[in-house]
Amino acid sequence: MDYLAQIDKKKTPVHVAIIMDGNGRWAKKQGHERLYGHNFGVESVREVLKASTDLGIKYLTLYAFSTENWNRPKEEVDGLMDLLVRSIANEIDELMSSDVRLLTIGDTEGLPASCQAELKSAMAKTENNKTINLVLALNYSSRWEITNALKQISRKVSSGEIKEADVNDQLISDHLTTKGIPDPELIIRTSGEHRLSNFLLWQAAYSEFYFCEVLWPDFKREDLFKAVLDYQSRERRFGMVSEQLT
Ligand code: FPP
């Protein structure tokens, strides 16, 4: 089926966020170590980024490493950090020629120095690119992010910089690491798991969710188109009733 032909380009989501899950199971199924799956996962990242650009999506956020992922075996954590550094170095020319801006969310100061340096350099190089923003969630978790925002806000209230009455939705959003990034209209999770795993909990207030059985290394262009098509079939009411939406 040609999913792309059925997509209404005028109604594509501005921001799609993806929980890339299933790399380990994919590798195991082929008799390999988990890192083999992560390596192939990078191919899916490349393909989905290109497909997102073709659809006119402006923000693609990928959950690449959570604050809880540090608890994995050291060999896997080191391998993932190394893969991240190598992937960014390998892809920087492509990011430039495709006009992709690289951003991160999460506590990136907690990443190894080599990772921070590679990210800093790639973000600086791509900062004026405009076609699409590739947002990598690294050492990210919503509870960390919300706690961090609450600390910043309470400090400002205590010092008198802001008043308690100034605290509202927008002010909280502006203290999250996603500041300036619109909330995702669509959140995709691969591999058959149906949970958010501490990802964009605040930002997902009105997101549509799409869960599919496909393991991340098998998630390709057509799978993204299928998810967007499914999203376009939904009625987003934002707490209102159908009749109010005309
Ligand atoms: C989840 O699968 C995947 C991750 C924790 C890492 C995702 C990383 C990549 C796809 C590669 C690096 C990305 C970039 C942006 C260069 P899992 O290991 O939890 O799989 P499982 O549930 O089958 O064990």
Image (cartoon, grey):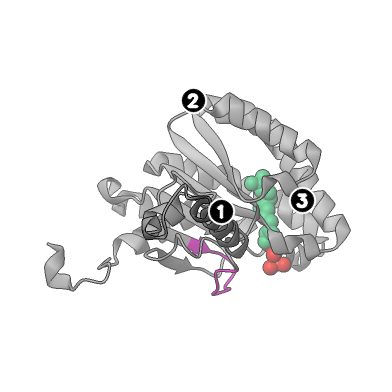
Closest to the observer, 162 or 243: 162
Q: What's under tag 2, amino acid-wise?
A: Asn
Residue at mark 1 to residue at mark 2: CA–CA distance = 33 Å
Left/right placement of residue 48 relative to residue 119 reads left
Q: Which residue is mark 1?
A: 155
Is the CB atom of the residue marked by disc 2 within 8 angstroms of ligand 1's nearest atom?
A: no
Q: Is residue 185 magenta?
A: no
Magenta part mainly helix, strand or loop?
loop
Closest to the observer, 237 or 57: 237
Specify which label sits upstream in the sequence, 1 or 2. Answer: 2
CB atoms of marks 1 and 2 within 8 Å: no
Residue 118 visible in the snapshot: yes
Disc 1 secondary structure class? helix
Closest to the observer, 35 or 184: 184
Q: Which residue is mark 2?
A: 128
Which range of residues does the magenta coloring cover?
188-197
Other-residue count near label 1 (Cα within 10 Å), few / some / many at <14 / 14–19 / ≥20: few
Residue 94 visible in the snapshot: no
Specify which label sits upstream in the sequence, 2 or 3. Answer: 3
Q: Quadrant of residue 117?
A: top right
